[in-house]
Amino acid sequence: MMKVLIVGSNGRVGSQLIDKLVEKGHFVYAGTRRDNMTSNSSQVRYVQIDLSDSPEVIAEQMSDAEAVFFTAGSKGKNLLQIDLNGAVKVMRAAELKKIKRFIMLSSVFALEQDKWNESFLKGITDYNIAKHFADQWLINNTKLDYTILQPGALKEIPGSGKIDVNIDKAGENSIENVVNALAHCLQEPATIGKVITMCDGETPIQDALQNL
């Protein structure tokens, strides 16, 4: 059992990730900018994480978390402040708290600019730019034990429990599969220090992540 902080716990991925981590026996600090959230579960505690705050203030809200998931997003409304600098602030806060494990939900091919003009990525260039520089900061400007998971388009469809990783072409991703992949990353040492592109596929999630 680990104590885990999810930043962006009210989002489509974050809200399901809470349930998945609790199912696996972890204690979850559910980070949200709202200050009046409560949970009926003894394994979940809501904490206020406002990404407009300084890294020092954010760090104060991390309690005794042993790992951090960053799943927050502005839905295109505030990419620089939330998707880019908000992520960097949480990384800095984690280092202030001496939390080593950091799992980032990113975007497929965010670090491969030559693919941004392909049809499946057109229209989200600004989002890719924000994710690109957030991912670069995590890799090059921190000493965190990071995993960067980069799925393509998220779909509200049933998860198959099977994915492809290190893909050459983007594909659809059920939110359930992405949530399961994130949860498996927490317990799979092979994912540390890796950037993992993914889509729904043919390999059981645990096997795909063990054999990176």
Image (cartoon, grey):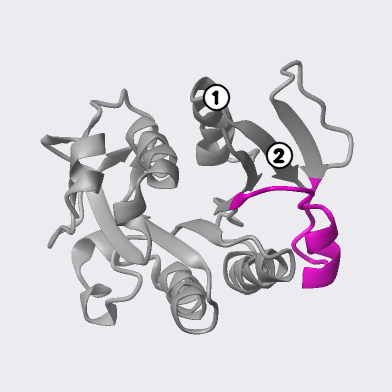
**Taking 88 as reference, is 62 left or right?**
right
The alpha-carbon separation of the residues under discs 2 and 1 comes to: 13 Å
| Contact check, label 2 and label 1, Cβ < 8 Å | no
Name the spot of residue 104 as percent of width and height, x first: 48, 58
Q: Most extreme residue toward the right, as rendered?
A: 36
Image coordinates for residue 68, horizontal then vertical, percent = 59, 52
Give the residues drawn in magenta, as a range.
48-67
Neighbours of disc 2 within 10 Å: few (<14), some (14-19), many (20+): many
Whether 53 is among the magenta residues is: yes
Residue projecting furthest to the top: 40
Looking at the rendered structure, the kind of residue marked 2 is Tyr
Residue appearing at x 72%, y 18% in the figure? 41
Residue 193 percent location from the top left of the image: 37, 66
Closer to the camera, 20 or 34?
20
**In the image: residue 191, left or right of residue 142:** left
Circle 1: element type:
loop
Q: Nearer the viewer, residue 73 or 138?
A: 138
Residue 86: give x, y in percent of width and height: 66, 67
- What number is the disc on residue 29? 2
For residue 95: magenta? Answer: no
The amino acid beneath tag 1 is Gly
Which residue is denoted by mark 1 in the rendering? 25
Residue at x 50% of width, y 74% of height? 138
Q: Which mark is residue 170?
A: none
Q: Residue at x 76, y 52 (%)?
A: 62
